Image (tube, rainbow, N blue to C red):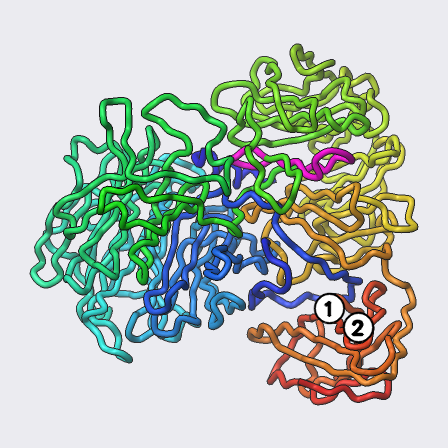
């Protein structure tokens, strides 16, 4: 369930449905040195799961119909696409070094200029996230972003992340924004559309609520701070700052503050209730009501008591409008929304009602009376005002068969995001710990008919991925996921019918299959009560539980012998063990320390490998005994992943390390007796194998690495001698260090594990197996060029170039030349190679894009540095031909 999500993310970090160009994130620092890396054009998509994570915020624009955004705790932000009823990701450009900016603590959509959207980003406020937070601003609905760094951290995955929204745009003077900060940093304001921020010095309360003061990690002991900002639009006129602003503070005795002079002065709102935290403050300006949802805890997991209150903005009268007596609540209230077409209609959620289900409340008389989404007839039987259709995401039933009053699928849990479409009273969306649900016939509730709830989540992929395998037969992809266990994908474009069950791990930590018998699959994972290992004999379609050795507390890593005859398991809480058969009886392995990472040789069923704290271990007797290898110079820590190559005994690749020690990619051809470090790889965190390139005998290598000074996803078709970067700056997905694998059946296809953006897979445009080492750049026909700066920040920019063959004969190679007018210097280029002398630049094809048919185009892009200005080149040439420019 969603309660384990924080553990998944932290363990991973400690150690999309989109092709084409998604948004680019500005303000990334330029590379330290000029590099030129062979590149390939890939099409990137998600292996469809649809959801899989907590959605703490949904934001509709108040002035443009069908414009909506969703935020996730670790998986970025999304924009709703009404034409396809899908979500499109907006932060895939967040790179490795700023992985924390995939956590979104708040979103704001500008009602004055709907093209503008803002995101407050940062994942943890403690040491787990090394970077500070930032406010990203976009003038094109998230297609591109500029960044304002903050002098403090933000916590998209911290306690209290379902409260909000902490970020708000003044509805009358949209250059003014407010941001509520955690950690005692107070209230912040921008007066230049988010470009710069300063603390509101006279705001009187920075908050004082912490979930657990005794937590030494800083996670549960952080001050949750300022949690929401709400403007009263009835107190302003276009172009002038709104006069009245309400602010919610994480302080049970002083939860609500107000300014009536556009933020010049602030005071505690008199007469307010105490003893609770105000999770949300939603204002109905038409009727003069500020609605507040209260809980005794910050959420999103906890909360045992709660209330709903209404504040009359004109008279200062407070009214308790809670739908039930305080003594009868066992949950807090959070999700809160007003129907803007009929402002007397209000809805709220019992976000922390885990059992038997969440609850949604609805009032059509401003909170005087309420009805529930479900109620008891005669306990434990329920009557629901809704029906649920999860046929598009059938795994949402969890394969469960609960006893009443529980039902499957559940209405939800952690339901802190709840919004009625401001233009359509029939459409409502709400976020849960696993998906976004919604309805398009909500008003049937009021007539006594049932309304229909369905997942409204397609395109939003939010799983944290721990391991991936792609067997040579059967399903092309089997995954190990945080929180929802994992899936067997027989079709990457379709949502699987069910996650792994029998047992249903909360998080699967490791997967393996028998190389010569790929129907034999093993998985290890976490479970509150029950076995931590399971086996399949039909390629992961069905599973049965194994037996744990004594002391096991978590999944750890597991390896299957090449022929499936035995298994080696290194679980949490116990040492390394081995078993013949399917894990009914385990024996302790000797010679290898507890906590070691284990893998199998892919040819010899008696050979297994292990790694722990800089030492490589080898077993030749099926895991009974291990011997430490003499190999030296390997990473000293345990942030390492290694794999043995299929079809070659003793061929092992090892990736990992840390910036303060050994870090890179190593290769052994003698079963780990010795390793050779690849000198052309600066850092590497994963390694995987896929089908060999046409004409090559060795399998293709894939890695998430830093090569040539550039962080990215790389491919090699010649055993690591040369590398091709296969992603680009617009497709980075934050942290990609958990797992990577190629497809043994499709050359060029790669599967990438992300920490919150699901399973990304890419297909190559290169079918030829690598670049031509000496392409012919000699066409002389007519040409056309489109040069576009897609992103610009202080001292740097990103540009895309399209070159079209407008002549009468095909090109078998090309070179495009131009001169920068302001002596800009290219720092990184993709889908081309380049040389630069002074202002003069030559960009020429790489092997796979040398051939350009008449009327066809090639695209490449680059990042570059500038100082005084960034003018556009006036002239482009291919050979002696001057190209038409647009």
Measured Cα–Cα span from mark 2 to mark 1: 7 Å
* Callout 1: SS: strand
Residue holding disc 1: 829
x, y percentage for residue 362? 23, 46
Can residue 124 be seen here? The reply is no
Q: Is 476 in the magenta?
A: yes
Q: Main secondary structure of the magenta part?
A: loop
Which of pointers 2 and 1 lies earlier in the amino acid sequence? 1
Q: Nearer the viewer, residue 115 or 467?
A: 115
Q: Quadrant of the C terminus?
A: bottom right
Q: Quadrant of the N terminus?
A: top left
Rendering quarter of residue 274: top left
x, y percentage for residue 422? 31, 61
Which residue shows up at 68% across the image and 65% down it?
31
Which residue shows up at 85% across the image and 37% down it?
668
Count residues near mark 1 (Cα–Cα under 10 Å), then give few for <14, some for 14-19, many for 20+. Answer: many
x, y percentage for residue 160? 35, 45
Can residue 554 be seen here? The reply is yes
x, y percentage for residue 782? 81, 85
Q: Nearer the viewer, residue 334 or 200?
A: 334
Image-based side of 299 in relation to 816, left or right: left
* Callout 2: SS: strand
Image-based side of 54 in relation to 211, left or right: right
Q: Circles 2 and 1: CB distance less than 8 Å?
A: yes
Residue holding disc 2: 834
Which residue shows up at 46% across the image and 48% down it?
73
Count residues near mark 2 (Cα–Cα under 10 Å), then give few for <14, some for 14-19, many for 20+. Answer: many
Image-based side of 208 in relation to 368, left or right: right
442 is higher (above) or lower (below) than 26:
above
Per the rendered image, the range of residues in magenta is: 468-486
Q: Is 215 in the magenta?
A: no
């Amino acid at each position: 369930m969603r309660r384990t999500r924080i553990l998944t993310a932290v363990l991973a970090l400690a150690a999309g449905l989109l092709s084409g160009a998604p948004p680019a994130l500005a303000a990334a620092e330029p590379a330290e040195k000029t590099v030129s890396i062979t590149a390939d054009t890939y099409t990137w998509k998600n292996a469809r799961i649809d959801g899989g994570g907590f959605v703490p915020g949904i934001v509709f624009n108040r002035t443009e119909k069908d414009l909506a955004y969703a935020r996730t705790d670790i998986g970025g932000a999304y924009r709703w696409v009404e034409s396809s009823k899908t979500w499109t990701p907006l932060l895939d450009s967040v790179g490795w070094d700023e992985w924390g900016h995939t956590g979104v603590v708040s979103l704001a959509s500008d009602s004055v200029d709907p093209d503008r959207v803002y995101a407050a980003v940062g994942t943890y406020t403690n040491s787990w996230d090394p970077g500070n937070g930032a406010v990203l601003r976009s003038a094109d609905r998230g297609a591109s972003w500029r960044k304002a760094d903050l002098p403090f951290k933000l916590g998209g995955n911290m306690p209290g992340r379902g409260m909000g929204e902490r970020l708000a745009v003044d509805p009358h003077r949209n250059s003014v924004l407010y941001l509520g900060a955690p950690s005692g940093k107070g209230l912040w304001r921008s007066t230049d559309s988010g470009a710069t921020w300063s603390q509101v010095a006279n705001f009187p309360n920075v908050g004082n609520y912490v979930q657990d003061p005794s937590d030494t990690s800083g996670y549960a002991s952080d001050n949750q701070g300022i949690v929401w900002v709400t403007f009263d639009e009835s107190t302003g006129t276009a172009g002038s700052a709104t006069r009245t602003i309400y602010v919610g503070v994480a302080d049970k005795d002083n939860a609500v503050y107000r300014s009536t002079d556009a933020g010049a002065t602030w005071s505690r709102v008199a007469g307010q209730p105490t003893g609770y935290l105000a999770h949300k403050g939603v204002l109905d300006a038409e009727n003069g009501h500020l609605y507040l949802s209260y809980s005794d805890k910050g959420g999103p997991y906890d909360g045992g008591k709660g209330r709903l209150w209404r504040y009359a903005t004109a008279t200062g009268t407070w009214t308790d409008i809670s739908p039930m007596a305080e003594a009868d609540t066992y949950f807090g209230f959070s999700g809160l929304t007003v129907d803007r077409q009929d402002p007397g209609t209000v809805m709220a959620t019992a976000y922390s009602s885990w059992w038997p289900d969440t609850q949604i409340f609805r009032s059509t008389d401003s909170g005087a009376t309420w009805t529930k989404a479900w109620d008891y007839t005669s306990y434990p039987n329920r009557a629901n005002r809704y029906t649920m259709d999860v046929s598009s995401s059938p795994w949402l039933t969890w394969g469960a068969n609960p006893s009443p009053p529980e039902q499957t699928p559940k209405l939800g849990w952690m339901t802190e995001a709840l919004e009625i479409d401001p233009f359509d009273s029939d459409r409502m969306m709400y976020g849960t710990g696993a998906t976004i649900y919604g309805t398009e016939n909500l008003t049937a509730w009021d007539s006594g008919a049932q309304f229909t709830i369905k997942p409204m989540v397609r395109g939003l992929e939010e799983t944290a991925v721990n391991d991936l395998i792609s067997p040579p037969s059967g399903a092309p992809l089997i995954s190990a996921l945080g929180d929802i266990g994992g899936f067997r994908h027989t079709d990457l474009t379709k949502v699987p019918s069910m996650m792994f069950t029998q047992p249903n791990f909360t998080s699967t930590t490791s997967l393996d299959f028998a190389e010569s018998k790929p129907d034999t699959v093993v998985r290890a994972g976490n479970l509150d009560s029950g076995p931590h290992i399971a086996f399949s004999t039909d390629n992961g379609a069905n599973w049965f539980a194994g037996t744990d050795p004594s002391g096991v507390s978590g999944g750890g890593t597991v390896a299957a012998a090449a022929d499936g005859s035995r298994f080696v398991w290194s679980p949490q809480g116990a040492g390394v063990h081995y078993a013949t058969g399917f894990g009914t009886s385990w024996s302790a392995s000797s010679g290898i320390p507890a906590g070691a990472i284990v893998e199998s040789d892919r040819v010899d069923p008696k050979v297994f490998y292990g790694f722990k704290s800089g030492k490589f271990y080898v077993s030749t007797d099926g895991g009974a005994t291990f011997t430490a290898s003499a190999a030296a110079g390997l990473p000293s820590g345990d942030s390492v992943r290694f794999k043995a190559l299929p079809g070659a005994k003793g061929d092992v690749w090892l990736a990992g390390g840390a910036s303060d020690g050994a870090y890179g990619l190593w290769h052994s051809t003698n079963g780990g007796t010795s390793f050779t470090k690849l000198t052309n790889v600066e850092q590497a965190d994963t390694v995987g194998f896929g089908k060999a390139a046409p004409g090559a005998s060795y399998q293709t290598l894939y890695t998430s690495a830093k090569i040539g000074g550039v962080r990215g996803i790389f491919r090699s078709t010649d055993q690591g001698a040369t590398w091709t970067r296969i992603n680009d700056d617009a497709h980075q997905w934050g942290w990609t260090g958990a797992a990577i694998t190629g497809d043994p059946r499709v050359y060029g296809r790669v599967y990438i594990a992300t920490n919150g953006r699901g399973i990304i897979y890419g297909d190559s445009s290169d079918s030829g197996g690598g670049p031509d080492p000496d392409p012919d750049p000699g066409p002389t026909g007519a040409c056309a060029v489109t040069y576009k700066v897609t992103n610009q920040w202080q001292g740097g920019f990103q540009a895309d170039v399209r070159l079209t063959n407008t002549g009468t004969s095909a090109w078998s190679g090309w070179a495009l030349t131009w001169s920068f007018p302001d002596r800009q210097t290219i720092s990184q280029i993709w889908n081309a190679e380049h040389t630069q002398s002074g202002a003069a630049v030559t960009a020429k094809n790489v092997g796979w894009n040398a051939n350009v048919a008449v009327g066809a185009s090639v695209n490449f892009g680059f990042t570059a540095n500038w100082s005084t200005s960034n003018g556009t080149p006036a002239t482009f040439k291919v050979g002696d031909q001057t190209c038409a420019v647009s």
